[in-house]
């Protein structure tokens, strides 16, 4: 005789609980790596866009094509690693259904954006391509950022919330170094000039505020600051580079000399900020 359906409910409930709780089985170290690399994806969306725009302006074309290919490949590899796991990157497979759904959105947006990368690599950079870059990069960034926020929220049971916020926002600083450079180059390429001037001003202000908050705390941003001497020394290094780059951005200098400075300063600023993120990640191991 067929058993009543009610007898199967406890097993279903147990399986559901097990599947949902498996997302919380990561160690603090693993979750730190996930938040770091998911956060780095935000930066890569902006770095790709910046590199396309540098190529469009004829700045170090061969070098920027090579860099663009590396950036796109890394974005693609990391996105797949976040979904399915990647031992080389130290990424465990994501099991949380909501985050997987969000990463699917990112994958769909990436499929739309990638032809812009291919066009730049083939030398086809007419204004229509640049307008697509301008229109499509922010949805890709915003949806990747949403995934990062979801990872940070998920980490609550195995990573101190203040630490998760710090790794998240320090990682976001990497993105802002590239976003502000992208905005300067959009202006230089004549794309939505007034809007991008306003965006650039906001990005500069957020980068500066977050840098101060990482050092000395910012309650509104959820940053406790740090007393770690090594991390403070690294953030001071970032501040020194920022002092060199900020005048170019404040003056919206899109002259050949200004763009040369932007190309020169943005990568060291990114590299040194990334070192700080890695130090924060190491601190939770």
Image: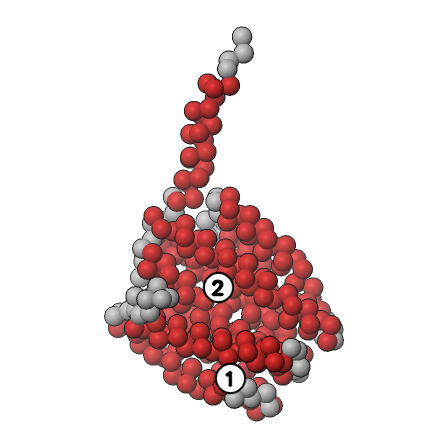
Residue at left offset 56%, top offset 88%: 253
Q: Nearer the viewer, mark 2 or mark 1?
A: 1
* Side of 147 relative to 185 (left or right): left
Residue 262 against residue 103 in the figure, above or below: below
* Side of 14 relative to 189 (left or right): left
The local crowd at label 1, few if under 14, some if 14 to 19, many if 20 or more residues have their Cα within 10 Å, is many
Give me the C-alpha separation between circle 2 and circle 1.
23 Å
Asked whether residue 23 is in view, the answer is: yes
Q: Which residue is mark 2?
A: 40
Quarter of the image where one finds residue 166: bottom left
Identify the disc placed on residue 282. none
The local crowd at label 2, few if under 14, some if 14 to 19, many if 20 or more residues have their Cα within 10 Å, is many
Q: Residue furthest top?
A: 1
Quarter of the image where one finds residue 71: bottom right
Quarter of the image where one finds residue 237: bottom left
Where is residue 215 drawn, in percent x and y? 32, 73
Residue at left offset 25%, top offset 70%: 227
Residue at left offset 65%, top offset 63%: 113
Q: Quadrant of the N terminus?
A: top right
Q: How is the image coloured?
A: secondary structure
Determine the secondary structure under disc 2: helix
Where is residue 169 drawn, in percent x and y? 41, 65
Residue at left offset 57%, top offset 80%: 197
* Side of 70 relative to 220 (left or right): right
Where is residue 233 drawn, in percent x and y? 31, 76
Pick the residue in front: 91 or 156.
156
Looking at the image, is mark 2 or mark 1 earlier in the sequence? 2
Q: Quadrant of the C terminus?
A: bottom left
Where is residue 110 drawn, in percent x and y? 62, 59
Determine the secondary structure under disc 1: helix
Pick the residue in front: 211 or 279.
211
Q: Which residue is mark 1?
A: 249
């Amino acid at each position: 005789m067929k058993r009543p359906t009610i007898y199967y409910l406890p097993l279903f409930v147990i399986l559901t609980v097990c599947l949902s709780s498996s997302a919380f089985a990561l160690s603090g170290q693993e979750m730190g790596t996930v938040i770091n690399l998911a956060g780095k994806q935000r930066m890569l969306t902006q770095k790709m866009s910046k590199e396309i725009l540098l190529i469009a302006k004829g700045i170090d074309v061969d070098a920027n094509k090579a860099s663009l290919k590396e950036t796109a490949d890394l974005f693609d590899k990391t996105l797949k690693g976040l979904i399915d796991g990647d031992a080389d990157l130290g990424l465990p497979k994501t099991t949380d259904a909501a985050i997987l759904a969000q990463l699917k959105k990112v994958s769909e947006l990436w499929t739309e954006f990638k032809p812009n990368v291919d066009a730049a690599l083939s030398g086809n950079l007419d204004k229509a391509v640049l307008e697509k870059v301008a229109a499509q990069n922010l949805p890709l960034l915003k949806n990747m950022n949403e995934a990062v926020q979801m990872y940070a929220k998920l980490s609550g049971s195995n990573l101190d919330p203040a630490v998760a916020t710090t790794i998240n926002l320090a990682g976001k600083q990497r993105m802002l170094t590239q976003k502000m450079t992208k905005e300067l180059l959009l202006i230089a390429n004549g794309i939505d000039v007034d809007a991008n001037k306003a965006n650039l001003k906001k990005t500069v202000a957020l980068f500066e505020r977050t840098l101060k908050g990482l050092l000395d705390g910012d309650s509104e941003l959820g940053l406790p600051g740090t007393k770690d001497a090594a991390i403070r020394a690294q953030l001071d290094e970032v501040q020194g580079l920022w002092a060199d780059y900020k005048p170019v951005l404040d003056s919206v200098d899109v002259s050949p000399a200004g763009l040369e400075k932007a190309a020169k300063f943005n990568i060291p600023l990114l590299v040194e900020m990334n070192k700080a993120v890695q130090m924060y990640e190491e601190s939770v191991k």
